[in-house]
C-alpha cells in the first residue's frame, strides 16, 4: 500500500509532510520547521511519530527536530554530508543509500546546490519525491552554498525520475515561480496553461503542491536548461550549465 501523506502548512509558506506507512504504522515528519502543528496533526489522527526526516539543515526545515524528539522519541534521519548541522541526528544517509521506512524504502540522492549537504528522498513504490528546497514546482532553490554546475547535476538526477513522480517540495512558491518562468518561456503553451491553473488554485486558497515530474519537465525552466531553444534564448547554445546559471541569475534579480 502507498504512503499516506498529509501536508501541514507552517510558518509563512513552508510545508511539513506527515508520512504514514500503513503496513507497519511507521510515521515520519519531513522537514518540521516547528513542532506544534506536527504534534497537533499527530494527535488528531492518532498517529505516533517514529521518524523525523530532514532534507537539509536550514532552521525552517529542522527547527522542530529536538522538540519532536523529546515528545515522541522519534529517530532523526538527515544528510550524511551535513550531519554536523542537523539537530539531534541519529541516522545519516547519503547518495545511493536506501532509507527503510516501515515496509517502504526511499532512495536517497545527494542534491547539493542550495546547501552543500542537501539530500532528497524518492519513495519509488509511492511515486513520491521529497525534494526540500532543491526542486520547487516551476523553480529551484537559491545557490547559497553551491555552484550552478552542482545544482544542474542535482536537478539532472531528479529530472530522470519517472514522469508520474509526485514532487513534494518545501515551500508554496509556485505562483511566483510561474510568473518568472513566463518571462523565460512566454510562448510555452504548457507553461501558460499551468500558470492559469496555479492562479486559480491560489485564488481559491488551495495548495499547488504536489505536482508531477511530467509537469516540471514541461514547464520548469530550471529543468529545461538542456532544451536547445531555451539555450539559444539565454545566449548559451549547447551549454546546459551556462543556461541554468543565466536563468538562476535572472530569477535572483526578478
Image (tube, rainbow, N blue to C red):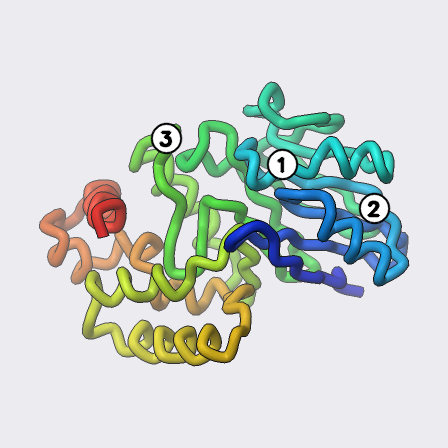
Q: Which one is closest to the eye, mark 3 or mark 1?
A: 1
Q: Residue 165: x and y, percent?
A: 56, 62
Query: Can residue 68 be seen from the camera position used here?
Result: yes
Q: Residue at x 51, y 29 (%)?
A: 117
Q: Residue at x 53, y 46 (%)?
A: 132
Q: Is 99 above or below relative to 169? A: above
For label 3, count other residues whose C-alpha is less than 10 Å away and answer few (under 14), some (14-19) or many (20+): some
For label 3, the residue is 146
Snapshot quadrant of residue 91:
top right
Q: Secondary structure at mark 3?
A: loop
Q: Secondary structure at mark 2?
A: loop
Q: Earlier in the sequence, mark 2 or mark 3?
A: 2
Q: Residue 197: x and y, percent?
A: 41, 79
The circle drawn on residue 49 is 2
Left or right placement of residue 128 versus residue 252 in this view: right
For label 1, the residue is 62
Query: Can residue 240 be seen from the camera position used here?
Result: no
Q: Residue at x 55, y 67 (%)?
A: 164
Q: Which one is closest to the eye, mark 2 or mark 3?
A: 2
Q: Residue 24: x and y, percent?
A: 89, 53
Amino acid at each position: 500500500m502507498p504512503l499516506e501523506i498529509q501536508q501541514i502548512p507552517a510558518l509563512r509558506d513552508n510545508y511539513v509532510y506527515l508520512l504514514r506507512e500503513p503496513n507497519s504504522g511507521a510515521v515520519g515528519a519531513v522537514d518540521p520547521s516547528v513542532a506544534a502543528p506536527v504534534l497537533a496533526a499527530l494527535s488528531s489522527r492518532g498517529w505516533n511519530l517514529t521518524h523525523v526526516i530532514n532534507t537539509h539543515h536550514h532552521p525552517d526545515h529542522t527547527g522542530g527536530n529536538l522538540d519532536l524528539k523529546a515528545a515522541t522519541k522519534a529517530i532523526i534521519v538527515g544528510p550524511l554530508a551535513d550531519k554536523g548541522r542537523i539537530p539531534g541526528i541519529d541516522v545519516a544517509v547519503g547518495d545511493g543509500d536506501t532509507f527503510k521506512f516501515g515496509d517502504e524504502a526511499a532512495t536517497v540522492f545527494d542534491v547539493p546546490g542550495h546547501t552543500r549537504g542537501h539530500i532528497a528522498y524518492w519513495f519509488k513504490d509511492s511515486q513520491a519525491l521529497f525534494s526540500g528546497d532543491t526542486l520547487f514546482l516551476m523553480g529551484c532553490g537559491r545557490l547559497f552554498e553551491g555552484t550552478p554546475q552542482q545544482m544542474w547535476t542535482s536537478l539532472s538526477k531528479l529530472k530522470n525520475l519517472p514522469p508520474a513522480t509526485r514532487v513534494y517540495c518545501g515551500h508554496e512558491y509556485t505562483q511566483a515561480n510561474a510568473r518568472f518562468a513566463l518571462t523565460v518561456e512566454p510562448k510555452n503553451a504548457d507553461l501558460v496553461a499551468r500558470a492559469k491553473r496555479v492562479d486559480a488554485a491560489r485564488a481559491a486558497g488551495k495548495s499547488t503542491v504536489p505536482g508531477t515530474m511530467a509537469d516540471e519537465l514541461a514547464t520548469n525552466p530550471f529543468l529545461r536548461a538542456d532544451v536547445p531553444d531555451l539555450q539559444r534564448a539565454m545566449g548559451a547554445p549547447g551549454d546546459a550549465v551556462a543556461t541554468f546559471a543565466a536563468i538562476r541569475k535572472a530569477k535572483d534579480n526578478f
